[in-house]
């Protein structure tokens, strides 16, 4: 089991993955807004088992965003 984590503190503005979806390290899983800039959070290789945040949530650096198996 692995997690997609936030690279920095910010706000989730877009979720581009779904439960059960196969993702790779190249997939744009989340869009995170930090300091008025949008940043792409890339996936981890595996299947999405849980999405742990919603659009609009504020997250801290290294916060888990999704569980990957």
Image (cartoon, grey):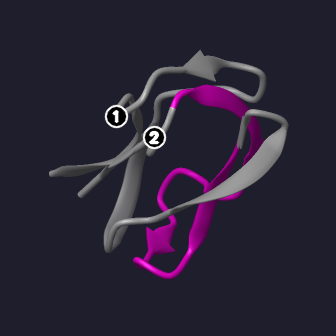
Name the N-terminal-most of marks 1 and 2: 2
Picture coordinates of residue 7, whole percent (x, y): 44, 45
- Element under disc 2: loop
Q: Is residue 29 above or below residue 65?
A: below
In the displayed structure, 24 sits above or below 37; it is below
Disc 1 element: loop
Residue underneath mark 2: 6
Residue 26: percent from left, percent from top? 50, 82
User: Residue drawn 63% across and 28% down?
Assistant: 10
In three-dimensional space, the C-alpha distance between marks 1 and 2, rounded to whole angstroms, equals 5 Å
Q: From this viewpoint, which residue is outermost toward the front? A: 35
Residue 46 counted in the magenta span: no
* Numbered range of the magenta stretch: 9-32
Please report the residue visible at 67 percent of the width from the left and 19 percent of the height from the top: 57
Please give the name of the residue rendered at 45% of the width and 40% of the height, measured from the top-left corner.
6
Residue 13 inside the magenta-drawn segment:
yes
- Eyeballing the image, is 20 above or below 22? above
Relative image position of residue 39 (x, y in whole percent): 68, 54
In the image shown, does 20 or 13 lie closer to the viewer? Answer: 13
| Residue 33 left/right relative to 47 | right
Instruction: In the rendered view, tell whether residue 43 sits above or below residue 8.
Output: below
In the rendering, at what x and y percent does residue 59 appear? 54, 22
User: Which quadrant would the C terminus be assigned to in this image?
Assistant: bottom left
Residue at the spot of label 1: 62
Is residue 59 or residue 50 the one in the foreground?
59
Q: Which mark is residue 31?
A: none
Left or right position of 38 against 67: right
Label 2 CA crowd tier, 10 Å (few <14, some 14–19, many 20+) = many
Q: Is residue 19 left or right of residue 18?
A: left
Tag 1 near tag 2, CB within 8 Å: yes
């Amino acid at each position: 089991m692995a997690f997609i984590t936030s690279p920095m503190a910010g706000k989730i503005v877009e979720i581009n993955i779904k439960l059960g979806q196969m993702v790779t390290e190249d997939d744009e899983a989340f869009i995170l807004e930090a300091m008025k800039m949008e940043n792409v959070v890339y996936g981890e290789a595996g299947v999405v088992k849980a999405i742990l945040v919603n659009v609009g949530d504020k997250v801290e650096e290294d916060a888990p965003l999704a569980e990957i198996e």
